[in-house]
Each structure stands twice: as structure tokens, then as C-alpha cells.
Amino acid sequence: MEGDVWLSKILEVLEEFSSEEFQKRIWLGGLGPEVSSSEEALCRLFDDLGFSRLIDFEWRQAGLNESQVMPLRVFRERLLDFDRDIPEIPNPADVLNHWSWNDVRESAENAAETLRLPSG
């Protein structure tokens, strides 16, 4: 996948993780037109889009600089820490009400913001 396309798809998932409105409307309420859940977003990010491969090995080839990749790594750590704390198939309300979910959401917003900046 080309760097620009890869980054735009990752940005879409980061925006999903950062949006409380989206999470309440879609994950909790199922009020489409989108269909998603925290598990689906997690799988899309790591399995389908190879997020760890990007931020560990291919970030330069994708056009990112060091200051851009750091917020992506922080987000990954917060998300993976959160994922270790919840059951395998969590109830959406439990995700949104978990004590550390706001940290995940904020780190996703920081990561999304850094992808919106020029890499120059």
C-alpha cells in the first residue's frame, strides 16, 4: 500500500478512536450508517493496516518524521495497555466508561493531529 493511502486509512481509524461522539453513536448505539466496534477498529488498525509495522519499521518510507511517529507510538502503548485490562469481547459501555479510556481517546487525537501535519 502506498504511503499516502496507508496514512489516510490509519488516520480514519485514529479519528474513530478519538471521537467520543462516534463511539457513542456507533459503538454504543449502533446508529449507523457506519458499522464498527472497539474490537473492529483495533483489528482494522493492527491486522488490516499493519499499524505496528508502520510505526516500528516503515515510518520513513511512508513519509513520516520522528516527531510524527512518537505520538503514534504513545497511542499504541495506551491502546494496548487498555486492551490488556478489558475482557476479550468487552461491552461497548464498559469500554467507554473505563477509567483509562479518555487517555486512549486523547492519545488517538494527538496521533491523528500529527498525521494531519506536513512531514517536512
Image: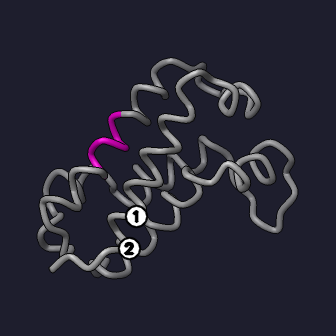
Instruction: Name the residue: 55% across, 52% down.
Output: 18
Categorize mark 2 by other alpha carbons within 10 Å: few (<14), some (14-19), many (20+): few
Q: Amino acid at mark 2?
A: Arg
Query: With respect to residue 87, does 8 lie above or below?
Result: below
Quarter where residue 77 is shown: top left
Question: 48 or 70: which is nearer to us?
Answer: 70
Is residue 39 on the magenta stretch?
no
Q: Position of residue 84 (x, y in %)?
A: 45, 21
Q: Which residue is mark 1?
A: 113
Please, what is the dominant secondary structure of the magenta stretch? Answer: helix
Number of marks: 2
Instruction: Name the residue: 35% across, 72% down.
Output: 7
Q: Position of residue 64 (x, y in %)?
A: 19, 69
Query: With respect to residue 8, does 53 lie above or below?
Result: above
Instruction: Name the residue: 17% across, 51% down.
Output: 56
Query: With respect to residue 73, does 16 lie above or below?
Result: below
